[in-house]
Amino acid sequence: MMQVCLNGARGAGDGALIPLSPGAMAESAAAAVAAGARDVHVHPKSPCGQDTLAPRAVAAALEAVRSVTSVPVGVTTGAWADPDPGERVAHIRAWTVLPDHASVNWHEPGAEAVAEALLDRGVGVEAGIWSGTDGTERFMASALGPRVLRVLAEVTDPDPGTARDSARALLAVIGRAHGRPVLLHGEEGGTWPVLRLAGRLGLATRIGLEDTLVLPDGERAESNAQLVSAALTMLGTPSR
């Protein structure tokens, strides 16, 4: 499964190609799905372009993306959007439009409460396990582990020369991951080496402007759709 990560915490300073408005998110998602993506991960934005879990912004992003595609759509619950775990939970309980899934970074304070709030509302949980954190230990000890939709094995090593080894080390620590499916991905310079490894291991993966702004040859990407096409070509799966 190829997930497209449309924007991440990036903003206008990363270039005009980053989709920040609901309309831009929808347009980018539609093109990425047409190119072969089968799942969408998006960061709803405030009017000033910052990540937010506010119900109105989440609803606007979800409704826009769903108006142009029928694949599952998920959002972030990252602590950078709201450092107070109680506020994150309150936002989730106030959402008027629900995503199909939401990522929860297990090393962040309040991860268990955030995940439980999502599960209570019938939202699938993507358990974000970042390399270089204690997220793995926390997740493996969690009673919620068997209930998550999947594990996001997130390799934070941006060095293309070492990211693949970092990915293998992370997967070894995650182990059976409560028996849940694993989606493996990297970021920045580590994006493409880790994506190639995911393909070799038969794991789900993702690509998009959240993780990298460049194509495998180092050229600046022009869109999420172009990144999806390049990723599927690398994996030997023709894009649409």
Image (cartoon, helix red, strand yellow):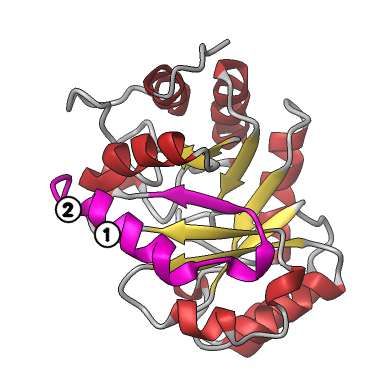
User: Residue 50: x percent and y percent?
Assistant: 45, 60
Q: Any magenta on residue 170?
A: yes
Q: Residue at x 32, y 50 (%)?
A: 187
Amino acid under disc 1: Ser
- Is there any visible trace of residue 202 in the rendered image? yes
Asked whether disc 1 touches disc 2, contact meaning CB atoms under 8 Å apart, the reply is yes
The kind of secondary structure element at disc 1 is: helix
Q: Is residue 174 above or below residue 235?
A: below
Magenta stretch in the rendered image? 158-185
The residue identified by callout 1 is 166
Residue 16's image quarter?
top left
User: Residue 219: x percent and y percent?
Assistant: 19, 23
User: Residue 132: x percent and y percent?
Assistant: 30, 74
Q: Any magenta on residue 173?
A: yes
Residue in front for this viewpoint, 177 or 61: 177
Residue in front for this viewpoint, 175 or 98: 175
Q: Residue at x 38, y 38 (%)?
A: 195
Q: Residue at x 72, y 79 (%)?
A: 144
Label number found at residue 162: 2
Q: Residue at x 76, y 70 (%)?
A: 147
Q: Quadrant of the N terminus?
A: top right
- In the picture, measured across the screen, residue 127 lies left or right of residue 224, that is right
Residue 169's image quarter?
bottom left
Q: Is residue 174 above or below residue 234?
A: below
